[in-house]
Image (cartoon, rainbow, N blue to C red):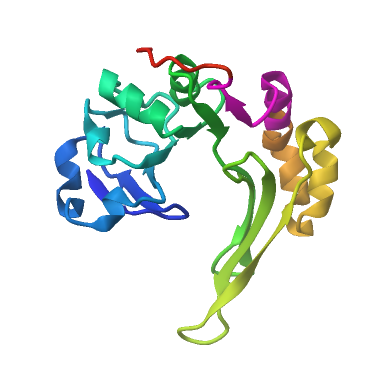
Amino acid sequence: MVVSSGYRKNGFDAYGGKVLRKNDMACWMESPQRTDPDGVALGLDGKVEEVEPDFFDLLPTIREVWMENPACRIHMTGNTVRLFQDNRVLLRGVYGSSAERLARGCHLRFLHLDVQLASVGDYYERGNDVITLRFHEDGSAYVYQDCRCQGISAGSMGGGETSFDLPGGFYRAMAPEDIAAMCWGSCRGEILGNGRLAAFMEEARAKGGVLLDFAKGWRKAVLP
């Protein structure tokens, strides 16, 4: 398993294997990044199936875990449950996943992962336009638009990026067509055609939001 410095997060990303073990953190044991007082986030890619017991003993300031595999299992010990509850850890995943079940069972917070809405075009020709629905830690949403393409000269890179915020409760107040109309024209047909945005908004309405706080009104630490 490879553990590298995190992308879009203050912490680490784990990938390249099925089981994340404590010894995978060996090269980070002396790094101040491992115990950052501002908090550490850990990303588990889609091929990670489980995290061994007591792994999070190595990350005493853990504050977020991104779980791309909806079936990924984190082996929870009593110490890990208490650590997660004391740090108010935020679990990121998809609806109905092990991340949501773990958040519910341990009285934590759950936030939906990014949702890729469209990917259109070819990097080597006119460019690849990618539209992604993203969420800040507080549950507020924004749309990130990224164009990647070759530059017109050797060693040059073209493309660009932009983003715009969505209003709170957008999944109730807006229709998929409203959001698609705000995106790059190259991607509007794909956004509406593949149905991902519509399906996500329907699930968000059913769940009551994108940030689900199962810790509200709860105090005593218990095992799931």
Image: 53 above or below 57: above
Relative height, residue 177 to residue 224 (above, below): below
The residue closer to the viewer here, 164 or 197, is 164
As drawn, 150 above or below 50:
below
Percent coordinates x, y for residue 171 in the rendering: 76, 33
Magenta includes 131? no
Image location (x, y in percent) of residue 139 = 64, 39
Q: Is residue 20 left or right of residue 224?
A: left
- Which quadrant of the rendered structure holds the N terminus? top left
Tell me if I can see residue 136 in this picture.
Answer: yes
Rendering coords of residue 121 (x, y %): 63, 59
What count of labels does the image hold?
A: 0
Identify the residue shown where x is 27% and y is 30%. Answer: 51
Near-viewer residue (66 or 220): 220
| Relative horizontal placement of residue 188, taking residue 67 as reference (left or right) | right
Residue 223: image location, x then y, percent: 35, 12
Q: Residue at x 34, y 29 (%)?
A: 83
Instruction: Check if residue 209 falls in the magenta segment.
Output: yes
Magenta extent = 200-216
Residue 64's place in the image compared with 79, above or below, is below
Quadrant in the picture for residue 82: top left
Observer able to see residue 77:
no
Q: Residue furthest bottom?
A: 153
At 29% from the left and 39% from the top, the residue drawn is: 60
Outermost residue to the front: 219
At 84% from the left and 37% from the top, the residue drawn is: 174
